[in-house]
Amino acid sequence: MTSTITGLPDRYRPLDEVGPEERTDTGVIHCWRAKDRILNRDVAIRVHVPGGPASRSWIARALTAGGLATPALAMVYDASEGTGGEGGVAYVVNEWIEGETLAERLEAGPMDERQARTILRRLAEGVAEAHRVGLAVGGLSPETVVLRPNGLVGLRAVPAATGSVQDDIAALGALLETCLTGRRAGGGTPVIHQPDLAALVRRARSTEPGAGLASAAAMAALLAERPRSHASVPVRDRDESDSGWLRRLREHREVEQQGRPAVPAAPVVEEAPHRLTPDTLPPVPQGRAARRQEAEDESWASDDADGFLADVDDEDDEPRSGLSRRLLVVGLPLAALVVVVLLALWVGNNLLSVSDEVDTTPGSGPTAPASSAPAEEPAEPSAPAGAPAALAAGAVFDPFGDGEPENDDEVPASFDGDPATAWSTLNYRGSADFGNLKPGVGIVYDLGSAQPVGGVTLTTTTPGIVVEVRTGDAPDGDLESFAVATSGTVDGTAELAFDEPVTTQFVLVWVTGLVPAEDGFAGTIAEVTVTPVT
């Protein structure tokens, strides 16, 4: 015996039809809320018309989904072909999810960032579980996503008749955009005011090779990351005239300077420059108290010296005052000490000069035998290697970024001559490919003028990063305006030689692969030297 819907088992009693019908290449799917009379519970029963061979791939997909256990996807209780009717029917019985659909919730307006992140993260985690078993879910829309009363989220129609992994990722991106803007994806060009989420939507919906997200799991990981502490700003369109990375960097620094309180400058104490000779040590800086005492001592010594000379030149035999006696006691030893020091310096300089002449004159050593062979002429010194080219400036190059600074203030540390200091990328979640958000980031260096370059030496504190060294004629072009000169993996320090010398003014070190770091993936550039061609 069957129910009033032809072909269904009598166990299920339909209550009312819910949701839009789903038209596919193999037929039409209708969905009813129904009562399971045996287990006395509500279920969602979806009927495919016609049944038979046209519906068997859908049934196979439903049986695969039956092995999933995640709150984000409605459980599959049963899937089979029905009976009766011309061509028959097929049906899938799902868990009935109580709650408000996402479409109903968005009628009240868009969601805040935290709520949108939470909903899409949980949904993406469920879709990722399906992808792990080789099942593309399909059917992701505001009408099928339900907000459960306990704060969780669930998808009612599992699985759709057809679907693909990339379609699921694109649908998740469209749902994220809809949650943040309150409007359907593709309906106009609403601005998403969270730069990282705007970039995530673009990557999820991108169809360009290498530009899309790798998986739903990567999207879930990125949504789980806490928003950066910087103030959110609207994402600029790529076609705007101020989208160059130099202009964005300049605007960011101006904003920081405007918001930073003025700090009173410390008083500058000017001191005369010290000129050093090769045989003297640099002077030791003195504190204020020491300099004040030294000035008082010099004044006292000057006064006492004047008095001492006056006493010596005085022809009178009058008894010297107490001050004069003190001068004699103190001044005479000081004068003797000065004479001894000067004499020692004179003797030392003369002896050292004679010793140097003896050491440097061939055959002048006292132990040199008279019959020794003539000394060989010293070999001509080899030509010195070309010194590294001076780098006039450097700046972050991030044409695929979302406007967020990439530790721009650390760039000088990458060419300051100290390998202990370094520029670092931001931390990225999900994968070493910049969390699947962009193909890379780097630093463009200005040599000051065009000159022939033969290679670059790189040092990193994160061994294993992958880089490309590119050259270009301008610092603010797109990535393709910089030609690839060489590439490789940097483990510590690596010398990356060009196949052919290149005459250029701008050298771009483009990082394309990161390594595991704390809470994600990152890469550093500790030192860059450019080798000129001589």
Image (cartoon, rainbow, N blue to C red):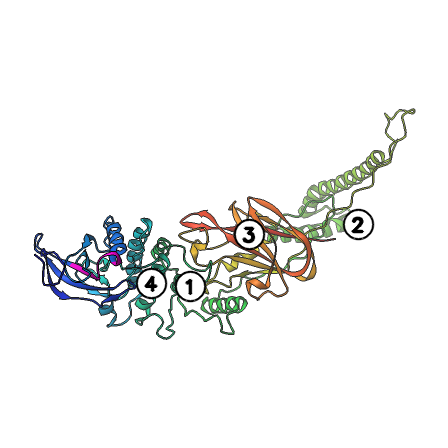
Where does the magenta region start and end? 44-54
- Which residue lies under the disc numbered 1? 206
Residue toward you, 129 or 273: 129
At numbered mark 4, what does the secondary structure look like: helix, strand or loop? helix
Instruction: Kindly identify the residue that appears in the image at 25 percent across and 70 percent down.
Output: 106
In the rendered image, the vertical position of residue 203 relative to residue 517, given as above or below: below
Distance between the alpha carbons at the discs numbered 3 and 4 = 33 Å
Label drawn at residue 467: 3
Relative horizontal placement of residue 449, taking residue 430 as reference (left or right): right
Residue flagged by tag 3: what amino acid is it? Val
At numbered mark 3, what does the secondary structure look like: helix, strand or loop? strand
Residue flagged by tag 4: what amino acid is it? Ala
Label drawn at residue 171: 4
Can residue 288 be spotted in the picture? Answer: no
Q: Earlier in the sequence, mark 1 or mark 3?
A: 1
Q: Earlier in the sequence, mark 3 or mark 2?
A: 2
Distance between the alpha carbons at the discs numbered 2 and 1 = 100 Å
Relative horizontal placement of residue 386, taking residue 121 as reference (left or right): right
At numbered mark 1, what does the secondary structure look like: helix, strand or loop? loop
On the image, the x and y values in percent for residue 313 come to 79, 49
- Which residue lies under the disc numbered 2? 313
